[in-house]
Amino acid sequence: MLYLILAAAGFFVQQINGDPIPGAWVGSYGAWFGFTDNQGYYSFHGTEPDTLSVHATGFADWTGLKPRDGEIVKLRETVFDTGEYILVSASRGSLVKTIPSTALLQEDDISDLSTAGMSRLNGKIPGISVREYGGSMPIVSVSVRGGDPSQVDHMIEGISIVSARDGMPTGIFDPAVFASVEIARGGAAAGGSGTGSAGAINYMPPLFSQPLSFSVSALSNGGAYFAGKYRGSAVSLRRNIGNEDTEGYSTTLLVTERYGDIKMGFLGAWASGDIEGPSWSLESNGHRKQAQAEAWGTMVHENFEVDLSAGAGLMDYLQTEPFAVDDTHKDFAARTSLLYRGPVTVRCGFNSTWLGSTATGDHSIQFGTVHLIKTHSFLYANTGCRFGSDESVHLSGRATAEQQLNRLTLHSSVFTDHRVPTVNDLYWPSDGYTSGNPDLKVERSTGAEMGISLASDYLTGEICGFFTKADDLIIWLPDESGTWTPSNISSSFSKGVELSGSFDMGCTAFSGTFTWNIATDETENTPREGMLLPYRPEYTWGSSADIAMPLEIMLCMDINGMGKRFTNRTQSEYLNEYWIADAALERQLSHSVSMKLGAGNILNTIYEETNGYAGRGRTLRLTLEYTGE
């Protein structure tokens, strides 16, 4: 009873014998709202619908009317025809449990990312800045807390899908096929292998109880999108149009299945389209094709877990003007890990990658990892190392303390992590425009954060301060001759404060974020010492409002902006600050069908995402959505 008094309004999730189930996910129609704490308690955010689902691996899903305050939801262990039980849940999956500064995007947010682009994250999530540019086959760069985009890991259910070629996913997949997306700010996630020293983006598939749902969108620039989900699987079909009317097509397929104590998944994506160059370059007719396939499986038996996964990627680039280019990249990866849950959880893993490229040649990379994970009361810690075939050893670790006091949650963390140079960093051939650097060193990052958050029936808020020091930071910029090449910055320092809050009365809701982030070059005895790193805005901000209107229409408004961004290391060239506004009208046509009419960049603001690439102008979009029972 004392716990219920101190906690925010919510309900308990327990086993049949009364033991709590921590980490159980609470959602509705395939979208996650949050998870239970160490006592199996879920605190209401105030935005949950009347019907909820509770999901915990190893237990049968529960779906029913929203529980009353203090009510207990009992989950039964899952029994299969063989008579076997799933005894423990897989350790793969959520980042929320290990990194406190993790934001959870739900169905509506993911729909916006799909139709309006990943740059919609600007101002929506504190500490995040995104550049999306390049035509119908865009390049997406996500920076976390002043870090380089290559320091952000990309995962599916906690399994990394980045390529050792460039540190990014090898294909372009539509976020609309996922039920929720976690964005973690801070490095050294448990089980990491040297790709997420600034943060991670984790895509979560739909629940196995996902009802049939789909959406169809048409854009004023000629783009058209379809995405559908059903029982843990999803598909997407897209026609993409760039700023200069370049045309491209893509498709994504996601399938997940469970057989007894084995869970499996497959993600396939294919995209083809024309690209657009910067305004300061010669006009070209470049065309790119990309494909990616990822498969994974998890088997749990008592205290042991075995994870197997594999991935393959292909990229073809063709160009005849202003000069001929025919470039092909292929990569294949096989990964395995064994986990034992005891007083200290131990995970051992091995990764083997082969990369072939007409530009960089053929390379293979093998490395192993060992991680120790310990959770005790309000403390969480992991430590690990990566050892490669080149006899190198790189350490990582994170310690987090989190305590709930009434409706406040306090947290603090320290971490250390690394990032190994990619094949492109090391071996990209010198062609007068770009060149790799085989002498690059491994990055080393060390950071800390401290924050406090509030969650009540109508009001939420969070403030978090952080800093990160990076040694030998790898950054791509033009050298004295104008050739783009990577180099190590001997030392850099990023510090900042993240603010976010929301007020939700059901029919009306407001939210906002603000991030102040200073990321500087700290190379001693150079003219660059103390100067801001390129493409790191000093501040980003955003606000949104959802207001109920007559005729059951909901008005949704968003504004986001960012400060000036320098494009070189001496602060002599920069992109201007900007802000853009979006608006949409949404109406529920029936119990299952809704319609949304939106306008992106409604004021048609002229701005640049990156040097020489204009941002998307005013774009109208119409979306119809169906959600079954």
Image (cartoon, rainbow, N blue to C red):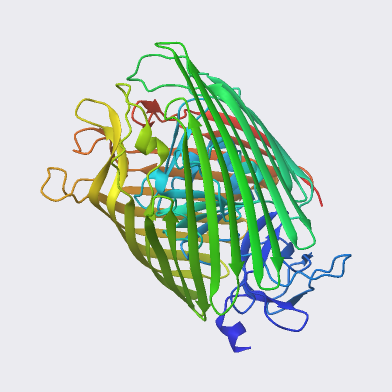
Residue farthest along the bottom direction in this orientation: 2
Residue 600, percent across and down? Answer: 52, 34
Which residue appears at 40% of the width and 62% of the height? Answer: 396
Residue 323 occupies quadrant:
top left
Q: Is residue 221 visible?
A: no
Q: How many marks?
A: 0
Q: Is residue 73 visible?
A: yes
In this picture, is 582 found above or below 517? Answer: above
Tell me: 627 left or right of 418.
right
Tell me: 166 left or right of 73.
left
Q: Considering depth in this image, is 584 or 475 the residue closer to the camera?
A: 475
Residue 488 occupies quadrant:
top left
In this picture, is 448 found above or below 175? Answer: below
Residue 79 occupies quadrant:
bottom right
Residue farthest along the right direction in this orientation: 81
Q: Quadrant of the N terminus?
A: bottom right
Residue 406, percent across and down? Answer: 51, 80
Which residue appears at 62% of the width and 40% of the height? Answer: 585
Q: Considering depth in this image, is 439 or 184 the residue closer to the camera?
A: 439
Residue 543, percent across and down? Answer: 46, 50
Q: Considering depth in this image, is 67 or 323 the residue closer to the camera?
A: 323
Residue 502, percent across and down? Answer: 50, 60
Which residue appears at 23% of the width and 31% of the height? Answer: 479
